[in-house]
Image: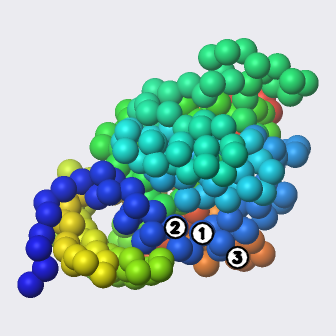
Amino acid sequence: MLETIQGDLYDFPKYYDLVYGSDWKAEFDFLEDCFERHADGIVERLFEPACGTGRLLIKFAEAGYDVAGVDLNPKAIDYCNKRLDRAGYPPSTFVDDMCAFQTDGQTDGQTDGRTDGLVDAAFNTINSFRHLGSQKQARDHLQCVADALRPGGLYVLGLHLTPTAVEPIQEESWSARRGNLSVLSRMWVIDLDLKKRCETVGVTFDVYTPSRQFRIEDKIAFRTYTFRQMGALLAGIDDFEVTAVYDFGYDIDNPIEIDAQTEDVVYVLRKVLKKRAK
């Protein structure tokens, strides 16, 4: 039986990055396709709220983009900044609340011929949005991102909706290996309370090294969203318009229509050039 450690998975960035960073290419290619197809103007400056270990930020930096990000977990930010620094890029991520942040460009008034200090696109693709536990936090987050974007810029937001016409997925697992290190991750639903809009999931990382094998175990609370609840939330943010919706197949040529069966969804939100009249 594996030794078990009860802890916050985000406090173990090396293992978290291995599990969730191994399939970066599909997301990277899809995001670049979104920038080209849906943004109004060239995308050069990127921002990732809830950036974690920077599994995508480092790839975009290597591709020539200016990158920055924010996360609440200091260990994840330290891991991300060290990774960027080792590769010769500025350590441009910082610890802050994704409901109440400002980018460096917003606070120092950078001007380089584009809108003062604002970014061209932001992304949050793997359910981190659902860590926000209230409607106010969700709205504040969306407004923070909108405030950081130039007009015509994009926010690509991916999450799991709660389907109401079919049974939701109850369990998922992933595995990844890097050299002599391998990690098997499992996530399962412990409780789903649609009235309180809370889904509690259990998550484990089974870690295998040549000298040690152990399990990290955690519980995570996610806010639930049906397709109607998410639609109503987005409709209340005047700065954004939904330009397209996709699933986790990340096929830019095949946008989807959302209904009561939809579970995996990626919203492509564009900051409006002019706010809607009240």
Marks 3,1: beta carbons within 8 A = no
**N-terminal of the two: label 2 or label 3?**
2
Residue extending farthest to the front is 211
Kindly identify the amino acid type of the residue bearing the numbered disc 2: Gly
138 and 56: which is toward the camera: 56
Residue shown at the point (60%, 36%) measured from the top left: 92
Query: Measured along the vertical axis of the image, is residue 208 above or below residue 76?
Result: below
Labels in figure, total: 3
Q: Which residue is mark 3?
A: 251
Q: Secondary structure at mark 2?
A: helix
User: What label does residue 24 carry, if any?
Assistant: 1
76 and 145: which is toward the camera: 76
Q: Alpha-carbon neighbours of circle 3 within 10 Å: few (<14), some, or many (≥20)? A: some
Frontmost of labels 3 and 1 is: 1
Left or right: residue 79 versus residue 172 is right
188 and 233: which is toward the camera: 188
